[in-house]
Image: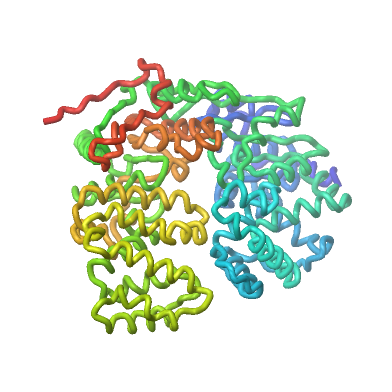
Amino acid sequence: MMRKYRIKRASGGKDITSAIANNLNPEQGAVVEHKSGPMLVLAGAGTGKTTTVTYRVAKLVSEGVHPEAILLLTFTNKAAGDMMKRVEWLIGDNIRGMWGGTFHHLCNMVLRKHADEIGYSRSYTIMDREDTKQMIKDCVAELGSERILPKPAVMTAISGLSKSTEQSVEDIIETRFFPLAENGPDIGKVLIMYEEKKRKNNLMDFDDLLLNARTLLDEREEIRDIYRERFVHILVDEYQDTNHIQSCLVDTLSEFHRNLMVVGDDAQSIYSFRGADFENIIKFPDRYHDVSIFKLTTNYRSTPDILDLANDSISHNSWQFKKELRSVKDRYEKPGLISLNDVYEQSSFVVSKIYDLIDEGSSLKEIAVLYRSHYQSMELQMELQRRGLPFEVRSGLRFFEQAHIKDIISYLRILINPHDELSWKRVLNLIPGIGNATSGKIFRSINKADEVIGELANVTSIVPRRSMDPFLLMVHCFNTISGDEAASDPFSIIEEIMINGYEQYLHNTYPNSDSRAEDIEQVRQYATSYSTVEEFVSDLSLQGTGFELTAGPEHNEDAITLSTVHQAKGLEWGAVFVIGLNDGRFPSRMALKDGDEEEERRLFYVASTRAKRYLYLCYTLTGGNTGGVGFLKPSRFIEELDTDLYERIYLERY
């Protein structure tokens, strides 16, 4: 079998050796020309990682390795497809039979041939996310718990993290979903039912593909040997983003030939919240003692000025492979560091500087504003809309389009207009067990009364029994926030809404409930500028950022990009603004509490290395909505930098 995959292939006539010499730098060439054995390629930001992997595959095939003996693992099937097309162009021949794609793609191909070995039919169906949520919803109904359990999306996230990290459901709830701990036993029962139902119906979700493929290879030696012998060379891209199961699969498949090349950058490992395991890359030499380590440090993206700052920042991490990026570009200008009074002045500065860049010839699509958390973009989005600058939000919906923000605004609209049917139905539908039909009945009943909010307590006969406790909590909330004194304080009203049920609703509904709570806190702080709820809600609506925001310039090809740093990884822009660089915000308070300072610093490193020519680092002295109270510290990632590496920009204030 091994000989079958080592057949010498006829050359298509293209000289790959000349192409390597002409198109690759010495660091890349050393990787491509390496003979055999385990390889760890530490590819810094902007150093031509994809090109290097592509040439490595082309070199292997040109030297006689059969394409069927090569496995290329990437994090998107498109990335693998693009690389394989490029390989065919380089060698002037096809590479039919080569396996390339995501881990899920690989596992599905293996299971389609052997799923019957672990109790499935080979004709199993792969469930998408909606299928998964529907089945979990069915399991909740079958369980018949009197408790209000989390929404299927939350339980899907718990299940997925449990599988990818190989931790128990109980441990995942305890460490990542602690507000749900009280319902942990029932969540566990639902997920057990979910697993049993899938098995009975010959179904697999995305996480099962990985887990079942690993089980198959672990338990069936003869099948394991087929693939260990077949794949003479295995190449893994973005290795720093692999989870524990993916790493185990790679280790298993490479045991025979040991020609494993993993490519990644420990300095850009930022996805632990998705289950990525930093130890996979950092401890790779511990698992492969004869590993050859290569470093790609020649950067083709950023100026030396930007790289000097990024190198200095990441040097403060103790757990890393030391390397320094070197630019091929000429020096241009140092990154700018700007201290702003508050988030409003920060937004005003960013927009003014964008206009300067446009005047100097920059296009909008070459400008990005990055931030740690989505809520940090709220004031900037409002300022951009006021100034008529088109922007695209890559970190999700525009701020006031998000469901949880619309929910809070609906509460406030009811206070202004108790006969607002749309807002009442939105709020009532937040209660488990109340759907459109029941919310319609409740609204029609209370809308007849002179005191609509006061009538809520008199319609309990319409409310389903399982919905009674959260409904009564909502009644209490409206009784609290509808008094004359409360109506003049939107800041306190939003706090009462959160305390009286909405915060728990977030935990039960969204896997990222903490970040959504941060969004609402930002809205609450923003509300301190207003003396009445009516003024606050009216202003949001008049600015075009309120309840029914129309589709804006997201599809405009020439638009400024707004994005979290997590969403920006792998991208680049001519000019990058990093805003909200305050301790407790970037790095985030939660990450510091969990001991994740080094991952947060890697996140700052990723943000800095997105910039090609201009980098502006912004922090505020106050939160901006606290009336001068509550001073903020600059991010530790700024304070630890060598002051020679940036230029302080001072604003002219009039």
Q: Provide residue 437's location: percent of width, then percent of height.
A: 43, 82
Colour pattern of the rendering: rainbow
| Residue 581 appears in the rendering | yes
Give me the residue at 39% from left, 59% from top.
404
Which quarter of the figure is the C terminus placed in? Answer: top left
Instruction: Name the side, left or right, on which 28 lies relative to 475.
Output: right
Q: Provide residue 198's location: percent of width, then percent of height.
A: 71, 68
Instruction: Name the side, left or right, on which 484 lies relative to 77.
Output: left
Give me the residue at 34% from left, 41% from top.
368
The single residue placed furthest to the right in the displayed view is: 222
Tell me the quarter of the picture where residue 200 sits: bottom right
| Residue 124 appears in the rendering | no
Instruction: Name the side, left or right, on which 392 lies relative to 566.
Output: left
Q: Provide residue 294's location: percent of width, then percent of height.
A: 63, 25
Q: Between residue 17 and residue 190, name the one nearer to us.
A: 190
Give me the residue at 59% from left, 60% from top.
155
Give me the residue at 26% from left, 32% from top.
340
The single residue placed furthest to the left in the displayed view is: 654
Examine the rendered structure and indicate whether residue 277 appears above or below residue 412: above
Tell me the quarter of the picture where residue 542 sits: bottom left
Instruction: Name the side, left or right, on which 126 lies relative to 425.
Output: right
Q: Provide residue 193's location: percent of width, then percent of height.
A: 70, 67
